[in-house]
């Protein structure tokens, strides 16, 4: 398989031009060009919320066409992203992909994107969704949620935010969810294990090798 993330030639060099374009100029330009339907933010909040994850954050001007590929420092070539989303944004000469990415990867709710990414990371690590066993039990949903929230607050105190990130990363959120789930299961005498890490990844590898799961 080809390593698509392998280092590539940086391409032609361009002198970096310090942009004096203001956030309001970028918002005003795209408000006239792009329908906010399907985006993470309303245009009324686009000056203070990341256009991908919808968190209020210190925003950065992200080139749509990278500076090194000839992108200009003008409102039509910028979107506003938080630092984390900026690092994940596409760096391609075709500007269409930025808008495809923004709409395809966002959530329609504020302040939920990174929590959702943590749950997805849990599913990748353990091959199932968190608390998938709870539906089979005769438990009061409200009481279970209260127990979960109490344990969650405690468990978050045992995790840290990586220096420079500003928010907890998805893998750490997944670990927090796993610990809370184990404690919650123990309180209700449910036997589960989160030790089979990588089951979903292993299944993918077997598929790539032409193998199948044993029925």
Image (cartoon, grey):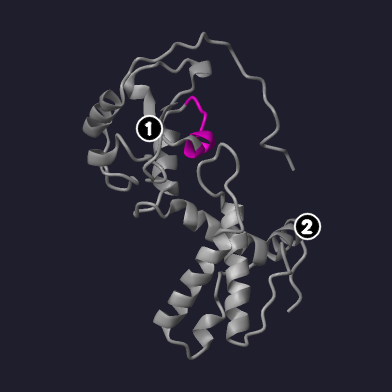
Residue 35 magenta-highlighted:
no
Instruction: Using the image, determine if residue 197 lies above or below residue 23.
Output: below
Return the x and y of residue 165 as percentages of the image width and height: 54, 40
Q: Indicate which disc, 2 or 1, sits on the residue closer to the N terminus.
A: 1
Q: Where does the magenta region start and end?
A: 84-93
Judge depth for marks 2 and 1 and give the one in front.
1
Q: Residue at x 58, y 86 (%)?
A: 188
Q: Nearer the viewer, residue 146 or 91?
A: 146
Q: Residue at x 56, y 69 (%)?
A: 129
Q: Secondary structure at mark 1?
A: strand
Dots 2, 1 in contact, CB < 8 A: no
Task: Give the residue number, with chain letter if any, for mark 1.
Answer: 80
Task: Give the residue number, with chain letter if any, for mark 2.
Answer: 209
Instruction: Using the image, determine if residue 190 lies above or below residue 36.
Output: below
Q: Secondary structure at mark 2?
A: loop
Instruction: Using the image, determine if residue 169 lies above or below residue 122.
Output: above
- The quadrant of the picture occupied by the C terminus is bottom right
Q: Is residue 29 left or right of residue 175?
A: left
Residue 3: assigned label? none
Q: Residue at x 51, y 39 (%)?
A: 84
- The quadrant of the picture occupied by the N terminus is top right
> Label 2 crowding class (10 Å Cα cut-off): few <14, some 14-19, many 20+?
few
Q: Is residue 99 left or right of residue 155?
A: left
Measure the alpha-carbon separation of dots 2 and 1.
41 Å
């Amino acid at each position: 398989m080809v390593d698509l993330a392998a280092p590539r030639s940086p391409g032609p060099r361009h002198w970096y031009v310090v942009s004096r374009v203001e956030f309001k100029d970028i918002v005003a330009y795209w408000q006239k060009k792009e329908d906010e339907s399907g985006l993470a933010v309303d245009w009324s909040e686009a000056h203070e919320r990341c256009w991908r994850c919808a968190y209020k954050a210190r925003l950065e001007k992200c080139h749509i066409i990278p500076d090194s590929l000839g992108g200009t420092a003008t409102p039509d070539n910028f979107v506003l992203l938080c630092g984390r989303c900026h690092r994940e944004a596409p760096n391609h000469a075709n500007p269409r992909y930025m808008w495809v990415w923004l709409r395809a990867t966002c959530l329609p709710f504020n302040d939920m994107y990174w929590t959702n990414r943590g749950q997805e990371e849990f599913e990748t690590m353990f091959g199932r969704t968190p608390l998938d066993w709870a539906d089979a039990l005769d438990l009061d949903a409200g009481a279970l949620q209260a127990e979960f929230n109490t344990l969650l607050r405690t468990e978050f105190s045992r995790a840290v935010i990586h220096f420079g990130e500003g928010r907890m990363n998805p893998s750490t959120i997944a670990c927090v969810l796993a610990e809370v789930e184990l404690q919650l299961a123990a309180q209700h005498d449910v036997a589960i294990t989160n030790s089979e890490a990588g089951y979903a990844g292993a299944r993918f590898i077997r598929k790539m090798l032409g193998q199948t799961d044993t029925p």
